[in-house]
Image (cartoon, rainbow, N blue to C red):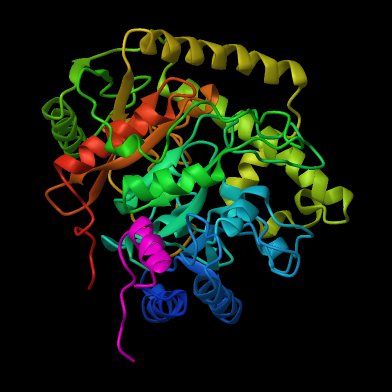
Amino acid sequence: MVERTPPGSATELAEAIRSGETCPIETVDACLERIEQRNNRTNAFVDVYSSDAREKAKEAAAAVDRGDSLGPLHGVPIAIKDLFDLKADVRCTFGSIPFESFVPKHTSTHVARLERAGAIVVGKTNTSEFGHSLVTDNRLFGPTSTPFDLERNAGGSSGGSAAAVADGLVPIAQGSDAGGSVRVPAACCGVVGVKPTFGLVAQPMRPDAFLADTPFVHVGPIARTVQDAATMLSVLVGPDPADPFSVPTPDLDLQSAPQKSIDGFTIGYLPTIGDLPVTNSVAETTESAVQALVTAGATVERATLDLDLDHAELSGIWRRQMGTLYHSVLEGFAAGGTDVFQDRRPDLTPSFRDMLTETADRTALELKRDDRKRTRVYDAIQSALSTYDLLVTPTTATTPPENNPSDVTTGPDSLEGVSLDPLTGWCLTHPLNFTGHPAASVPAGETSDGLPVGLQIVGDRFEDDAVLAAAGALERHDPWIDSYPDE
């Protein structure tokens, strides 16, 4: 079988399908062939829906032939993270052994929006168990590797989606981000990952409609190009009356944002957040990308945050808030007859089980005390953005961690002699889930040993277009579309 590589850009692919230059059937076949040949390298996909995808491709091709009105992603293959419901007869495992055969009853709102825009779901991608860690590994499917070094992790928890995009298995993929789970795998796999302003992408949740606010949980695109991420994001955004946090889409021109100039932008460069040590290789690669923003016309100044919380306190807040969120999730399943925490505890990933145990007796008052600390993070970010148009930081403090061949992989527990929380403590992303600001990770370059590094770009709330503009400027200065391994 001859390997066929799908086009690198989802936007260009959609245009080729609309013009008749490319057929959705051939495009989907090419993706499925590539998944069959290469997925064993990275373990990006956990389920592939070949028959269904080919049927959808035939329908897409017929729509083109009829001259139907076509959506912006018509015929484009896409992957969905295995934390979200695709449809009523397709399992959603959450990367968890107790849910290996769980079948949902509905389709997630943002998945339905992608399908209405014409995207064709070819499969589900790997994640950490319930997305609790910023690496991708679990006892059900094992680790996902970055294509840049198959012995290293793809980052998490949307690592399967990021690895699938970086390895050319699909041009775009969906991810979610409660602590960096879109941005960290984007950094580890050298792709673009966007966490939009909280509320822009509706996420109706039941039985707890208010689940996604502590910390803020976002859904966002993962892509090879900034334009592809912008196109996908433009499909995802929009309110839903079933989501109390969703907001009307502001006057954002997401589609054209990546082409806009950043001439005159003022950008604050934060070498770290909360005294987290950053390795020299990451710092040097990040600073090179920051200089590219200067070349693009921005004024960049070294900045600091007026924040009196250190990295350990920030990680602790996140860990406690996420643990409480997971108890609410699992309580909902328990009401339906699946009491995982009580009946299936030995089957859970040790780090996930520990998080649940640590937060099992947490009080509402303790939760609100952490919200007061979280407010200090919000105020510090907002204060900095009153001075600068954007903030930039490294996405992670170190390069992708090595996979653990004998146990479930975690992040590093120390760096430069400083103890870290291995779940999130090696990343500079989770503080932005306390605040809801838009943030993206874009490729900053590679270290001397060929490992990708991400630059995190942070904007004011509802100024997602400014984030995309800076990302596009960096991409124009140093395009990365042809930099992916293809061995």
The C terminus - image quarter: bottom left
The reply, left or right, for residue 231 in relation to residue 89 is: left
Q: Nearer the viewer, residue 354 or 258?
A: 258
Residue 151 is covered by the magenta coloring: no
The reply, left or right, for residue 284 in relation to residue 136 is: left
- Residue 439 visible in this rendered orientation of the protein: yes
Q: Residue at x 31, y 50 (%)?
A: 225
Q: Residue at x 15, y 40 (%)?
A: 477
The N terminus - image quarter: bottom left
Residue 18 is covered by the magenta coloring: yes
**As displayed, is residue 362 above or below residue 83?**
above
Magenta-highlighted residues: 1-21
Report how many numbered discs are placed on residues in the image.
0
Q: Quadrant of residue 345?
A: bottom right
> Picture coordinates of residue 250 (x, y %)?
53, 26
Q: Quadrant of residue 138?
A: bottom right
Q: Residue at x 31, y 80 (%)?
A: 4
The reply, left or right, for residue 37 in relation to residue 80 is: left
Q: Nearer the viewer, residue 30 or 359?
A: 30
**As displayed, is residue 228 above or below residue 406?**
above
> Picture coordinates of residue 189 (x, y %)?
32, 53
Residue furthest front as drawn: 67
Q: Residue at x 79, y 60 (%)?
A: 105
**As displayed, is residue 247 above or below residue 77?**
above
The reply, left or right, for residue 216 in relation to residue 274 is: right
- Residue 417 visible in this rendered orientation of the protein: no
Q: Nearer the viewer, residue 151 or 270?
A: 270
> Picture coordinates of residue 62 (x, y %)?
55, 76
> Picture coordinates of residue 233 (x, y %)?
48, 43
